[in-house]
Image: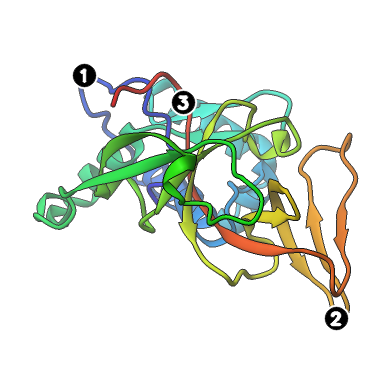
Amino acid sequence: MRTFNDFSSQPADRPKLTARQAQILELIQNAIAQTGAPPTRAEIAAQLGFRSPNAAEEHLKALAKKGVLELVSGTSRGIRLRTGALHALNESRMDSFLMSPQRLAQLSLPLVGRVAAGSPILAQEHIEQTYHFESSLFEQKPDYLLKVRGMSMRDVGIMDGDLLAVKQSREAKNGQIVVARLGDEVTVKRFHRHKNLIELLSENPDFKPILVQPGEPFELEGLAVGLIRGRLSM
Protein backbone atom coordinates (compact mmCIF):
# COMPACT_ATOMS: atom_id res chain seq x y z
CA MET A 1 0.00 0.00 0.00
CA ARG A 2 1.11 3.58 -0.65
CA THR A 3 3.84 2.39 -2.93
CA PHE A 4 4.93 2.92 -6.52
CA ASN A 5 3.40 6.44 -6.49
CA ASP A 6 3.61 9.22 -9.05
CA PHE A 7 4.18 12.49 -7.19
CA SER A 8 4.26 14.65 -10.34
CA SER A 9 0.72 15.90 -9.80
CA GLN A 10 -1.94 16.08 -7.09
CA PRO A 11 -5.64 16.10 -8.02
CA ALA A 12 -7.44 19.21 -6.88
CA ASP A 13 -10.48 17.15 -5.77
CA ARG A 14 -10.29 13.75 -4.20
CA PRO A 15 -12.09 11.28 -6.47
CA LYS A 16 -14.93 9.17 -5.10
CA LEU A 17 -14.54 5.44 -5.62
CA THR A 18 -17.19 2.77 -5.92
CA ALA A 19 -16.92 -0.19 -3.56
CA ARG A 20 -15.54 -2.36 -6.38
CA GLN A 21 -12.99 0.29 -7.39
CA ALA A 22 -11.81 0.58 -3.79
CA GLN A 23 -11.49 -3.21 -3.63
CA ILE A 24 -9.36 -3.31 -6.79
CA LEU A 25 -7.20 -0.42 -5.63
CA GLU A 26 -6.55 -2.12 -2.31
CA LEU A 27 -5.72 -5.38 -4.11
CA ILE A 28 -3.13 -3.53 -6.23
CA GLN A 29 -1.60 -1.81 -3.21
CA ASN A 30 -1.39 -5.09 -1.26
CA ALA A 31 0.26 -6.87 -4.20
CA ILE A 32 2.91 -4.15 -4.50
CA ALA A 33 3.57 -4.15 -0.77
CA GLN A 34 3.94 -7.95 -0.65
CA THR A 35 5.79 -8.67 -3.91
CA GLY A 36 7.18 -5.33 -5.08
CA ALA A 37 5.10 -5.37 -8.27
CA PRO A 38 1.48 -4.73 -9.28
CA PRO A 39 -0.74 -7.67 -10.32
CA THR A 40 -1.56 -8.59 -13.92
CA ARG A 41 -5.09 -8.15 -15.27
CA ALA A 42 -5.52 -11.92 -15.15
CA GLU A 43 -4.49 -12.03 -11.49
CA ILE A 44 -6.99 -9.28 -10.62
CA ALA A 45 -9.73 -11.13 -12.48
CA ALA A 46 -8.92 -14.41 -10.74
CA GLN A 47 -8.87 -12.90 -7.24
CA LEU A 48 -12.11 -10.98 -7.70
CA GLY A 49 -14.00 -13.64 -9.65
CA PHE A 50 -14.28 -11.78 -12.97
CA ARG A 51 -15.01 -13.89 -16.02
CA SER A 52 -12.08 -12.45 -18.00
CA PRO A 53 -9.15 -10.03 -17.69
CA ASN A 54 -11.15 -7.61 -19.86
CA ALA A 55 -13.43 -6.88 -16.91
CA ALA A 56 -10.41 -5.99 -14.81
CA GLU A 57 -9.13 -3.77 -17.61
CA GLU A 58 -12.37 -1.79 -17.67
CA HIS A 59 -12.18 -1.13 -13.94
CA LEU A 60 -8.53 -0.10 -14.27
CA LYS A 61 -9.43 2.36 -17.03
CA ALA A 62 -12.10 3.87 -14.78
CA LEU A 63 -9.58 4.26 -11.97
CA ALA A 64 -7.12 5.85 -14.39
CA LYS A 65 -9.78 8.38 -15.44
CA LYS A 66 -10.24 9.27 -11.78
CA GLY A 67 -6.52 10.00 -11.54
CA VAL A 68 -5.60 7.45 -8.88
CA LEU A 69 -3.45 5.26 -11.12
CA GLU A 70 -1.61 5.32 -14.43
CA LEU A 71 -1.70 2.52 -17.00
CA VAL A 72 1.63 1.89 -18.71
CA SER A 73 1.02 0.41 -22.17
CA GLY A 74 2.89 -2.61 -23.46
CA THR A 75 3.54 -4.28 -20.09
CA SER A 76 1.56 -7.01 -18.34
CA ARG A 77 2.03 -5.34 -14.95
CA GLY A 78 1.90 -1.76 -16.19
CA ILE A 79 -0.05 -0.25 -13.30
CA ARG A 80 1.42 2.72 -11.47
CA LEU A 81 -0.32 4.20 -8.42
CA ARG A 82 -0.56 7.96 -8.15
CA THR A 83 -0.60 10.14 -5.05
CA GLY A 84 -4.41 10.34 -5.14
CA ALA A 85 -4.71 6.57 -4.64
CA LEU A 86 -4.05 6.86 -0.93
CA HIS A 87 -6.50 9.72 -0.44
CA ALA A 88 -9.24 8.11 -2.53
CA LEU A 89 -9.00 4.76 -0.78
CA ASN A 90 -9.00 6.30 2.69
CA GLU A 91 -11.94 8.49 1.71
CA SER A 92 -13.90 5.41 0.68
CA ARG A 93 -13.15 3.74 4.03
CA MET A 94 -13.80 6.85 6.12
CA ASP A 95 -10.35 6.15 7.54
CA SER A 96 -9.46 8.75 10.15
CA PHE A 97 -6.14 7.06 10.87
CA LEU A 98 -4.64 9.02 7.96
CA MET A 99 -4.94 12.21 10.01
CA SER A 100 -2.93 10.99 12.99
CA PRO A 101 0.29 12.91 13.70
CA GLN A 102 2.34 9.78 12.99
CA ARG A 103 0.95 9.43 9.46
CA LEU A 104 1.41 13.12 8.70
CA ALA A 105 5.06 13.11 9.80
CA GLN A 106 7.62 14.13 7.21
CA LEU A 107 10.21 11.78 5.76
CA SER A 108 13.58 13.07 4.59
CA LEU A 109 14.96 10.70 1.95
CA PRO A 110 18.48 11.05 0.57
CA LEU A 111 18.96 10.47 -3.15
CA VAL A 112 21.89 8.12 -3.71
CA GLY A 113 23.98 8.65 -6.83
CA ARG A 114 26.91 6.58 -8.04
CA VAL A 115 28.12 4.14 -5.40
CA ALA A 116 31.84 3.66 -4.91
CA ALA A 117 33.14 0.12 -4.60
CA GLY A 118 33.62 -1.09 -1.04
CA SER A 119 31.83 1.80 0.68
CA PRO A 120 28.36 1.86 2.33
CA ILE A 121 25.54 2.82 -0.01
CA LEU A 122 24.51 5.66 2.34
CA ALA A 123 27.99 7.08 2.68
CA GLN A 124 27.85 10.89 2.61
CA GLU A 125 29.80 11.13 -0.63
CA HIS A 126 27.08 9.14 -2.44
CA ILE A 127 24.20 11.45 -1.46
CA GLU A 128 23.29 13.97 -4.16
CA GLN A 129 20.38 15.73 -2.41
CA THR A 130 17.45 15.14 -0.06
CA TYR A 131 13.70 15.09 -0.74
CA HIS A 132 10.80 15.38 1.72
CA PHE A 133 7.52 13.41 1.71
CA GLU A 134 4.61 12.65 4.00
CA SER A 135 5.24 9.30 5.67
CA SER A 136 1.67 8.23 4.84
CA LEU A 137 2.67 7.90 1.18
CA PHE A 138 4.53 4.66 1.92
CA GLU A 139 3.31 1.44 3.48
CA GLN A 140 6.85 0.56 4.53
CA LYS A 141 9.18 3.36 5.54
CA PRO A 142 11.99 3.75 2.97
CA ASP A 143 15.51 4.76 3.94
CA TYR A 144 16.69 6.30 0.69
CA LEU A 145 16.00 6.90 -3.00
CA LEU A 146 18.04 5.32 -5.77
CA LYS A 147 17.94 6.57 -9.35
CA VAL A 148 17.07 3.76 -11.76
CA ARG A 149 19.51 3.29 -14.63
CA GLY A 150 18.53 1.21 -17.64
CA MET A 151 15.39 -0.65 -18.71
CA SER A 152 15.93 -4.13 -17.27
CA MET A 153 12.79 -3.79 -15.06
CA ARG A 154 10.60 -2.19 -17.75
CA ASP A 155 7.81 -4.76 -17.64
CA VAL A 156 6.88 -3.92 -14.03
CA GLY A 157 6.84 -0.21 -14.87
CA ILE A 158 10.29 0.64 -13.48
CA MET A 159 11.87 2.90 -16.08
CA ASP A 160 15.23 4.54 -16.64
CA GLY A 161 15.40 7.75 -14.59
CA ASP A 162 12.72 6.76 -12.04
CA LEU A 163 13.53 7.14 -8.35
CA LEU A 164 13.21 3.88 -6.44
CA ALA A 165 12.31 4.15 -2.75
CA VAL A 166 14.38 1.56 -0.89
CA LYS A 167 14.16 0.09 2.60
CA GLN A 168 17.50 -1.15 3.87
CA SER A 169 17.51 -4.91 4.38
CA ARG A 170 19.98 -7.78 4.29
CA GLU A 171 17.24 -10.32 3.70
CA ALA A 172 14.66 -10.82 0.96
CA LYS A 173 11.94 -13.30 0.06
CA ASN A 174 11.81 -14.95 -3.33
CA GLY A 175 9.95 -12.76 -5.79
CA GLN A 176 10.71 -9.44 -4.11
CA ILE A 177 12.35 -6.60 -6.04
CA VAL A 178 15.68 -5.78 -4.46
CA VAL A 179 18.68 -3.52 -4.72
CA ALA A 180 21.79 -5.69 -4.82
CA ARG A 181 25.50 -5.02 -5.07
CA LEU A 182 27.57 -7.25 -7.35
CA GLY A 183 31.20 -6.32 -6.94
CA ASP A 184 31.40 -2.70 -8.14
CA GLU A 185 27.85 -2.67 -9.59
CA VAL A 186 24.54 -1.80 -7.90
CA THR A 187 21.50 -3.27 -9.65
CA VAL A 188 17.71 -3.51 -9.26
CA LYS A 189 16.33 -7.00 -9.92
CA ARG A 190 13.79 -9.59 -8.77
CA PHE A 191 15.34 -11.86 -6.15
CA HIS A 192 15.24 -15.65 -6.15
CA ARG A 193 17.37 -17.85 -3.91
CA HIS A 194 18.01 -21.42 -5.00
CA LYS A 195 19.74 -24.12 -2.98
CA ASN A 196 23.20 -23.46 -4.41
CA LEU A 197 22.98 -19.99 -5.95
CA ILE A 198 21.11 -16.71 -6.12
CA GLU A 199 19.27 -15.70 -9.29
CA LEU A 200 18.58 -12.04 -10.07
CA LEU A 201 15.83 -11.74 -12.66
CA SER A 202 15.08 -8.86 -15.00
CA GLU A 203 11.56 -7.86 -16.05
CA ASN A 204 12.56 -7.42 -19.68
CA PRO A 205 13.18 -10.33 -22.07
CA ASP A 206 16.17 -8.51 -23.57
CA PHE A 207 18.12 -9.09 -20.35
CA LYS A 208 19.38 -12.48 -19.19
CA PRO A 209 19.17 -13.58 -15.54
CA ILE A 210 22.22 -12.94 -13.36
CA LEU A 211 23.42 -16.04 -11.52
CA VAL A 212 25.44 -15.46 -8.34
CA GLN A 213 27.49 -18.48 -7.39
CA PRO A 214 28.72 -19.18 -3.83
CA GLY A 215 31.82 -17.13 -3.06
CA GLU A 216 31.10 -14.45 -5.68
CA PRO A 217 30.91 -10.85 -4.41
CA PHE A 218 27.25 -10.17 -3.56
CA GLU A 219 25.46 -8.03 -1.01
CA LEU A 220 21.76 -7.30 -0.56
CA GLU A 221 21.28 -3.57 -0.02
CA GLY A 222 17.52 -3.26 0.34
CA LEU A 223 13.94 -3.86 -0.80
CA ALA A 224 11.96 -1.74 -3.25
CA VAL A 225 9.00 -0.17 -1.41
CA GLY A 226 8.05 2.66 -3.76
CA LEU A 227 8.65 4.25 -7.14
CA ILE A 228 8.58 7.95 -7.95
CA ARG A 229 8.36 9.43 -11.40
CA GLY A 230 8.23 13.11 -12.26
CA ARG A 231 10.01 16.34 -11.42
CA LEU A 232 10.55 16.77 -7.67
CA SER A 233 11.49 19.76 -5.58
CA MET A 234 13.65 19.61 -2.50
Colour scheme of the rendered structure: rainbow
**Label 2 environment density (alpha carbons within 10 Å; few <14, some 14–19, many ≥20):** few
Decide which of tag 3 and tag 1 comes sooner along the chain. 1
Quadrant assignment, res 150: top right
Farthest residue, direction bottom: 195
Amino acid type for the residue under numbered disc 2: Lys
For the C terminus, the quadrant is: top left
Looking at the image, residue 47 sits to the left or right of residue 187; the answer is: left
User: Any mark on residue 195, and which?
Assistant: 2
- Whether residue 19 is visible to the viewer of this picture, yes or no, is yes
Query: Secondary structure beneath disc 1?
Result: loop
Rendering coords of residue 35 (x, y %):
59, 59
**Label 1 environment density (alpha carbons within 10 Å; few <14, some 14–19, many ≥20):** few
Of tags 3 and 2, the one toward the viewer is: 2
Quadrant assignment, res 128: top left
Label 1: which residue? 12
Rendering coords of residue 114 (x, y %):
59, 37
Of tags 3 and 1, the one toward the viewer is: 1
**How far is the residue under mark 3 from the one under mark 1?**
15 Å
Decide which of tag 1 and tag 2 comes sooner along the chain. 1
Q: Which residue is depicted at the point 38% across and 47% down?
A: 2
Query: Secondary structure beneath disc 3?
Result: helix
**How far is the residue under mark 3 from the one under mark 2?**
42 Å
Q: Which residue is depicted at the point 35% across and 38% down?
A: 85
**Label 3 environment density (alpha carbons within 10 Å; few <14, some 14–19, many ≥20):** some
Q: Which residue is depicted at the point 66% across and 56% down?
A: 180
Residue 57 versus residue 169 in the image, above or below: above
Amino acid type for the residue under numbered disc 3: Ala
Query: Secondary structure beneath disc 2?
Result: loop
Label 3: which residue? 64
